[in-house]
Amino acid sequence: MKSRYPFYAAVLLLIFAGLGLSMLRHFELGIPWLPGEQRPVWMIEARVDFEAKGDPVLISMNLPDEPPGFRVLSEQAASPGYGFSIVQDEGDRRAEWSIRSATGEQTLYYKAQFIPDPDAKPTPPQKPPVPETVYWEEPQQTAATEVLELAAAKSSTPESMTRELIKLLDSADPNQNTALLMAGTNRVELLERLLNYAEIPARISEGIMLEDARRRQSLRPFLEIYDGEQWLTFNPQNGQQGLPENVLLWSRETSSLLDAMGADQSVVSFAMLRQTVPALQLSRAEAMQNGLGFLSLYQLPIEEQSMFKMLLLLPLGAFVVAFMRIIVGIRTSGTFMPVLIAVAFLQTSLGPGLVTFISVVAIGLLLRGYLSSLNLLLVSRIATLIILVIFMSTAISIVGYQMGFNTGMTVTFFPMVILAWTIERMSILWEEEGPHEVVVQGAGSLFVAILAYLLMTVPIASHLTFNFPELHLVLLAVILIMGQYTGYKLSELRRFHPMKDYD
Amino acid sequence: MRWITPRELSSRGMLNMNRRNVDYIARYNERHAYPLVDNKLKTKLVAAEYDVASPKLMQVVAQQHEISHFRERVENMSGFAIKPAKGSGGKGIMVITHREDDLFIKASGVAVTIGALERHLTNILAGLYSLGGTPDVAIIEDLIQCSSSLTDYSFQGVPDIRIVVFKGYPVMAMLRLATKASDGKANLHQGAIGVGIDIATGESLNAVQYNRPVTVHPDTNLSLKHIRVQDWHTMLLMASRCYEATGLGYMGADLVLDETKGPILLELNARPGLAIQMANGKGLLPRLRHVEGIKRPHLTPEARVEYAMSRFNHTNSQFADSRTTKASA
């Protein structure tokens, strides 16, 4: 007896491969398990207003580049008459609008969609940043040194140093030194200078508070320090470390938010909107960029995609047939005929599909009764039946249409050759085994077809089969296991029940 | 609805469809041997080599144009049977018992014209009754004169005896009697009666119709209790020889008892049905497992039949109550 271990190992492998791949795709591409899952997306619009003086205009605005906690889904610019490009300049990502000449009030728009993603982290800088050299004049020099000494005494790391400094500047009764330093400068800039002076790389980033449907927002400063591995964000107002979830850091490593040439009174303002987008659509848009994207069907032309959507449902039907025949023991006419009928039902929907199917087969059986007396060869009899089936379908369509039922036309979705064979087989069954067997097998086939149809129409079924085609490996494994089932069928429990009488 | 639990079934050693397919047919029947049994013409030839008699072949119709010859040659034949060579389960078999003028009288008493016969031949050639619908040939055989000891029990039709042979050992047998409901056919699911036959003695055990126990034939009103099959030992021997002839480990041999020629092999079946267990009131599994467990298989059909007759008798407690044998397959 052959060892079954390789077989079960292969089956396990299939299950693991199927589940593993789909997990991977779920987590990497964010393809949702359930259809209709929604994800929030922030649409942020930056609006640049300025007055042009008739000269060539070049507007350069900083763009978010890998903002922590967000991923960029899409970006676009609206700017009539302007040339637009996005330039990457030493880690500084900028949008540039240019025009030969413009006069008067001008407005430029830049829109981007951001997906909140707690895992999104900016790539760490290639070489560690060096603190800027800071010069102080007396008496600030002495004050700064003393404040730093005070803070350093209570701290051990760059983070704790920063926290202590913010606390010192915040304290209710500032001492002379802090008061002196605070005079004439704002806190964030002071903090940046102090930290850099203390050999801790620090910079000012600007972020947007995300609130639904806000307009005319401006950026707020945040303090960032480098702890030797990554940039850490502090709220300069309260010393809170870390970036709040609702803050998007717009400009980080940059000298200026907006540079304008040939323009006056240039001003940037932000408007934002919280949108919800189907999670599936999101992951489709992102699949293009992701390395795992090639495994999905989204790249195919739409027409092929919808074709695959149908094709990938077939294994479910095959599974239902295998289950009903192996485990339950329902007799069907033609092994996989029910699957084809179920697929036709998908196009026609169940009610009209059933009516047309049964009427075509019933009329076909009547006509076949006449054909059998004609003494035809089998092949030509089937060919005749195919033509008759097509006539019947046409008649049903026309009559249905005239009577105002558009559903009659869906009869064309039935595979004509399969219908013809079904009629032929049923007719022979009738002659040989009697009408009872025809009813049993016909009903069995229809029952299995309806079950397969119901399974295929569950939204999650078509969602999973199409978006996680690798789950078919699991289905395959289950079907393989079923092929090993040597137990009693449900129908046999009934068939063999008279065995009770022999004891 | 009445049901039986899987536990009760397995304690009775009932072989089921899935296990038959996986553990017996797939394991013991080589694919290449199938054509030998699926084609009655080949079965006939190979059986003859092993001294297993089969109905006398009168004519083979292999081509459409040969059908016209059939009309000429059938002129001087009174009774015959038309069979598709690759038919299964008795499909497409037409038995003509005698003629009345131009009409041919079927076993059921229905009269058909020569045209209907020719149409039937055409259907057979086109593959209507063959497995998978492949083109087929029709064979015309001599009519079997069934032994009067059995015909009385059957309503029309020829009673035949199905013997399940496992690795050359006859393990279970039943007599199939046609009824009015089965239209003279010996197919159990069409309503024929299955009578379990004791391997050891050739005597009847239980009888079932439509899976229900019966004691008398519904049409002939004869008791089914004390039927005894003549030439039982020869029949078992013939069935056993088919193992050497075909190499099929698990098969069903269908035999009939001819009045003058004795036992005749009708056909072999590589996928014998499960209803034989109902007719015997016993599951096949204990016997199959017993044969699988034989350390030194008997080499000759005679020795195997001897062994089977001594082991698989109805009163042998080992096989009467299988609850004690729980060997793994």
Image (tube, coloured by chain):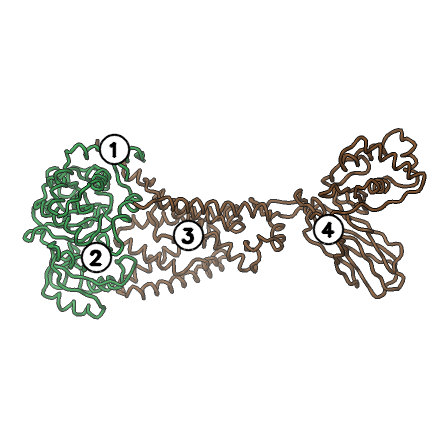
Chain colours: A brown, B green
Q: Which mark is residue A339?
A: 3
Q: Secondary structure at mark 4?
A: loop
Q: CA distance from mark 1 to mark 4?
A: 78 Å
- Chain under numbered label 1: A
Q: Secondary structure at mark 3?
A: helix
Q: Secondary structure at mark 1?
A: helix
Q: Which mark is residue A65?
A: 4
Between circles 1 and 4, the one closer to the viewer is: 4
Specify few, some or many for label 2: CA neighbours under 10 Å numbering under 14, 14-19, or 20 or more. many
- Percent from the top left, x then y, of residue A16? 48, 45
Instruction: Tell me which amino acid carries mark 4.
Output: Asp
Instruction: Tell me which amino acid carries mark 3.
Output: Val
Between circles 4 and 2, the one closer to the viewer is: 4
Residue placed under numbered mark 2 in the picture: B36
Q: CA distance from mark 4 to mark 2?
A: 76 Å
- Chain under numbered label 4: A
Specify few, some or many for label 4: CA neighbours under 10 Å numbering under 14, 14-19, or 20 or more. many
Callout 4 touching callout 2 (CB < 8 Å) = no
- Which quarter of the image is occupied by the C terminus of chain A? top left
Is B60 situated above or below A35? Answer: below
Q: Which mark is residue A500?
A: 1
- Percent from the top left, x then y, of residue A87? 75, 58
Is B325 situated above or below A311? Answer: above
Specify few, some or many for label 3: CA neighbours under 10 Å numbering under 14, 14-19, or 20 or more. many
